[in-house]
Amino acid sequence: MTCRALVTGAAGSIGAVVVDELAGRGFEVDGWDITEPAVRPGVTTAEVDLRRPVPRGLVRPYRLVIHLASVTENRDDRSSLVDHLGSVGMTAHLLDALSEEVPGAVVTTSSQLVYETGRQHPAEESPVAAATAFAAAKIASEAFLEAFGHRSGVPTAVFRLANIIGPTTRRGVVHDFVRRAGEAATAGGAVRITGSTHHRRSFLSLGDCASAIVERADALPDSTPDHQVLNVANLDSVSIADVADVVAAVTGIPFDAETHSERLAWHGDPGTVLPDISRLSATGWRPRSTSREAVHQAAAGLWASRVAR
């Protein structure tokens, strides 16, 4: 089989880095996105809207298919059920298209938010629950992929991601704090943070996330066909208050963080979630950056982009 890979959602923050990781490993890459990805050497790009059936003839013989296209908004107050139904539709349209040209392996990304609320250290076998529409769509997409693997005999895998951050991410607590620091820089004063700032998160850089996905995906075509689930997170964690401290140091804007509050930031916020990554660690994978380093790199890149505008 040709050493070729397909990445959907290739113009996104994770997708762009996954494309680069694959190209760096010698893959010829097809990058699909609803917005045509940037042109790179060794990468063929196409504007493909997976909310609709894939045009015939677009799928080629792939060693790997890495499906990243989805709705990324995880808050119910900022998205609708129909939005997330689109994510399930994207998965179904892709898998139907792959039935005609069966690849060596297919993987997709899911989220730590699929786990039952209240579990601080979920392992892959921990119960899942649709606390939000985002989680419901991820659980459904996982099931569609598993069914495809059973039907086709193709190895499949799901990567349940923790907080993946970098200078191009436009969602999550680091981006929110940098945005609010920018507003405070204009208006004067400090950034007031309320809610459960003592809760902890595992933050992983975009580069470390891409290396985990590609490394494990590339091992699948030569393995016994089955369905695997892997938590992808860092080995350590930081609190939300720690994130505020890092962003304050990067931006020079003071943060006033509430302490001893148990009030969660938004409906569906799981509080402290530190996924068990012993299954991934057993493969020999290790992140290059700590959670704090990943937060600093992301905050610095986001702040530099804001200052440059």
Image (cartoon, rainbow, N blue to C red):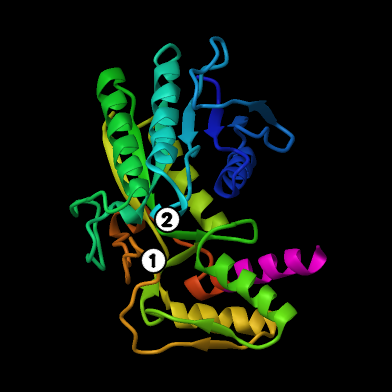
What residue is drawn where x is 44% and y is 87%? 258
**Which quadrant of the rendered structure holds the C terminus?**
bottom right
Location of mark 2 (residue): 77
Direction from residue 147 to residue 191 in the image, left or right: right
Q: Residue at x 35, y 58 (%)?
A: 281
In-image side of 199 versus 64 (left or right): left
Answer whether residue 81 is magenta in the image: no
Residue beneath disc 1: 266
Q: Residues within 10 Å of mark 2 (few under 14, many from 20)?
A: few
Q: At 47% from the left edge and 30% from the top edge, which residue is drawn?
A: 65
Range covered by the magenta-colored residues? 296-309
Location of residue 287 with respect to 147 vertically, above or below: below
Measuring 19% from the left and 54% from the top, which residue is drawn there?
A: 126
Classify residue 23 by image quadrant. Answer: top right
In this view, the mark in front (1 or 2): 2
Q: Is residue 108 left or right of residue 223?
A: right
Q: Earlier in the sequence, mark 1 or mark 2?
A: 2
What's the distance in space between the residues labelled 1 and 2, CA to CA? Answer: 9 Å
Circle 2 SS class = helix
Q: Residue 293, percent across and down?
A: 56, 73
Q: Amino acid at mark 2?
A: Asp
Residue 128 relative to residue 31: left or right: left
Q: Position of residue 45 (x, y in %)?
A: 67, 28
